Image (cartoon, grey):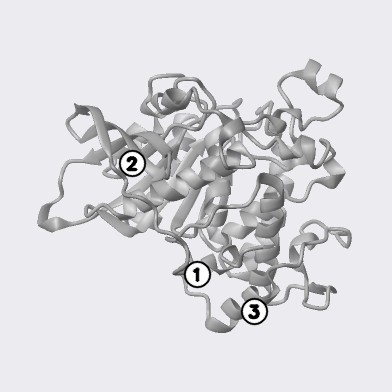
Amino acid sequence: MDNRINTMLSKISIPLFIFLTVILQHGFAQDKTFSCNPGSHLLKYIDSEGMAKKVESVHEWYIKRGQIIDSLESFIGTLPDIPTLPPFNSKIQDFPPFNTQIFDSLKTESYTRYNIKFTVAKNEDVTAYLYVPLEKGNNEKFSAILALQPTGMLGKKIVDGQGLPNRGYAKEMAERGYVVIAPDYPSYGDQVDYDFSTDRYESGIMKAVFNCIRCVDFLQARKDVNPERIGAIGHSLGGHTAIFAAAFDTRIKVIVSSCGWTLFSYYNNYNEKLRIESGSRLTGWAQERYTPLLRTKYNLDLNRMPIDFDELIATLAPRPFFSNSPVHDANFNVEGVRVGIANAMEIYRLFGAEENLQVHYPLSNHDFPPKVRFEAFEFIDKILKE
């Protein structure tokens, strides 16, 4: 495995001795067989001798974190080389220019929304809405948000408030004074004709993660954006895309996931008939736009899953993470969220950052109700604006 992944945390000032240890030990796969208590699998890592050891320090946690990222890549495929992320290998070829195209624009009292397309790699483009607030005085820079769409053929239009209610968080964040980029997820919106069978990625999730990382590059390249104040927010599909992207890219400083996750053993497929016929609650995750490796490599077997969401959330520590997890969400079962949060809290506790891990349980279904949505906005404000 390329050591690029496990050195990402240099962006949040990891001491050099931690950095070097992670580099030396990144290749050892994690092993959950020793798990006996909630969260205990997160507090064990494999040392250079292949032995299970207890995580007792932040130093040892970063070794474990690297092993989790390795397992994530075995689930969704390998992240392509990215010259804008550590370790900044000079042999990695630079990306082509963004070559941004603007198709149309809409000016409001508080922001201008641009409908754009830009290049993210050779023969690869991303379509997105870009929201730019009215200019600040004295060349002051804006904080920025990556607003990720939920499932829906309207794509980025959903987070502009053009679909179901309570989904217009891209527009709402722009109204709060953020530069916002809202990309189409591959196979939705202006990417509806995206062909997963001919791309270079092993899963739709990895393609989406790559696009998100390039969106962060795009934001950082803007003169009106503070490159150290970028966050991500998403509902449902966008909720777990935000988690996946932030696991790889530590430049994303705060993450909000609405109805985006539960432990896989608690996941409920909406299509009960399909779930019964396939014999697995994981069938929905095996689509091309998610990760077909779940079927081809892991045979939809829960017991063979290399990764789970408590581990993914733990990789975000100590960065602030906010979860909207409604009590009546029929897809992402709330009990799996409760267990997962308790497990991930062990790692936030290791950092002394328990307050950075927050979950809200509104009495609603698979929704992002106004009250909890604006609590999420305030959570972001405290990190990126104060």
Report the Cα–Cα distance between label 2 and label 3: 36 Å
Q: Residues within 10 Å of mark 1 (few under 14, many from 20)?
A: some
Q: Position of residue 347 (x, y in %)?
A: 66, 64
Residue at image coords 74%, 73%:
55
**On the image, numbered disc 3 is attached to which residue?**
21
SS at mark 3?
helix
- In front: 43, or 308? 308
Q: Residues within 10 Å of mark 2 (few under 14, many from 20)?
A: many
Q: Residues within 10 Å of mark 3 (few under 14, many from 20)?
A: some
Q: Quadrant of the C terminus?
A: bottom left
Q: Is residue 41 above or below residue 160?
A: below
Left or right of 132? Residue 230 is right
Taking the image as drawn, is residue 52 in sight?
yes
Residue at image coords 68%, 71%:
63
Farthest residue, direction left: 138
Taking the image as drawn, is residue 166 in sight?
no
Amino acid carrying label 1: it is Pro
Q: Position of residue 198 (x, y in %)?
A: 58, 33
**On the image, numbered disc 1 is attached to which residue?**
87
Q: Where, by quadrant of the figure, is residue 2 drawn?
A: bottom right
**On the image, numbered disc 2 is attached to which residue?**
180
SS at mark 1?
loop
Residue at image coords 18%, 57%:
140
Left or right of 217? Residue 345 is right
Q: Where, by quadrant of the figure, is residue 25 drawn?
A: bottom right
Amino acid carrying label 3: it is Thr
SS at mark 2?
strand
